[in-house]
Amino acid sequence: MTLASYPPAPLDYFLRDARQLARALLGAFLVHEAGDGPRVVRVVETEAYRGPGDAACHARVGLTRRTRTLLGPPGHAYVFLVYGMHECFNVVCLGEGEGHAVLVRAGEPVVGVPPDARADGPGRLARAMGITRADDGRDLTASPLYISPRRGTVRVGVSARVGVAYAGAFAERPWRFYDRLSPHVSRPPASAIGLGR
DNA sequence: CATATGATTCCA
DNA sequence: GGAATCATATGA
């Protein structure tokens, strides 16, 4: 069963480059129908990771146990642990084996998440949504974990990605996107290097 | 098998 | 500024 006002996006929503999906996900809703009730956040910050050729993307190491879901079919969740403590939720996209994914970095509480609970920052977002590595590989086109497309428009800000200094020139690519009007973005837009549509 | 290092957050 | 904390990747 799904929340009537938050219909799941169909598979073809995910069949595009991570850069495009990262923009599309701004303003979209991430829904988790957990055991203790539904949780919904409005996505306000994302980053695109674009396959083996992207030095900041985990797919650069090829197929391993960790990257199995990243290199698997689109429309599925890629959840991994960073720094030994924080889980990061990603949406696999484009096509199977492409290694494209969008990291969801922040959201605004909408349903089932206390209004004062913070969901800014990838680790906090995953925790607020009750998403763990157990959700790695989960199909994102149906309950209990899915994306519901945005309605309306978003003022998009663009910047370099966070925490990827090791990636050389790729660290500077403008592949982080955020809602300029949201106070729930994980970092101030001071580092903005351009504005989107 | 040993070791270095993160797509981070929290505390001092 | 530094610790917490551990799966993963890499090299011996």
Image: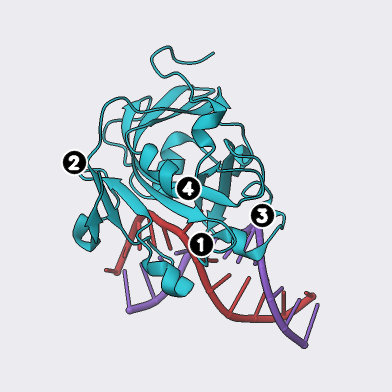
Chain colours: A cyan, B red, C purple
Q: Quadrant of residue A61?
A: bottom right
Residue placed under numbered mark 4 in the picture = A18
The quarter of the rendered structure image containing the N terminus of chain A is top right
Q: Are marks 2 and 4 on the same chain?
A: yes
Work out whether A76 lies above or below A148. below
In the displayed structure image, the side of residue A119 where residue A166 appears, left or right: right
Residue placed under numbered mark 3 in the picture = A66
Nearest to N terminus: mark 2 or mark 4: 4
* Comparing labels 2 and 4, the label whose residue is closer to the camera: 4
**Cα separation between marks 4 and 3:** 19 Å
Q: Amino acid at mark 2?
A: Leu
Give me the residue at 22% from left, 41% from top: A155
Chain bearing tag 3 is A
Chain bearing tag 4 is A
Nearest to N terminus: mark 3 or mark 2: 3
**Cα separation between marks 2 and 4:** 22 Å
Which element type, helix, strand or loop, lies under badge 1?
A: loop
Q: Amino acid at mark 1?
A: Tyr
Q: Which mark is residue A181?
A: 2
Residue placed under numbered mark 1 in the picture = A83
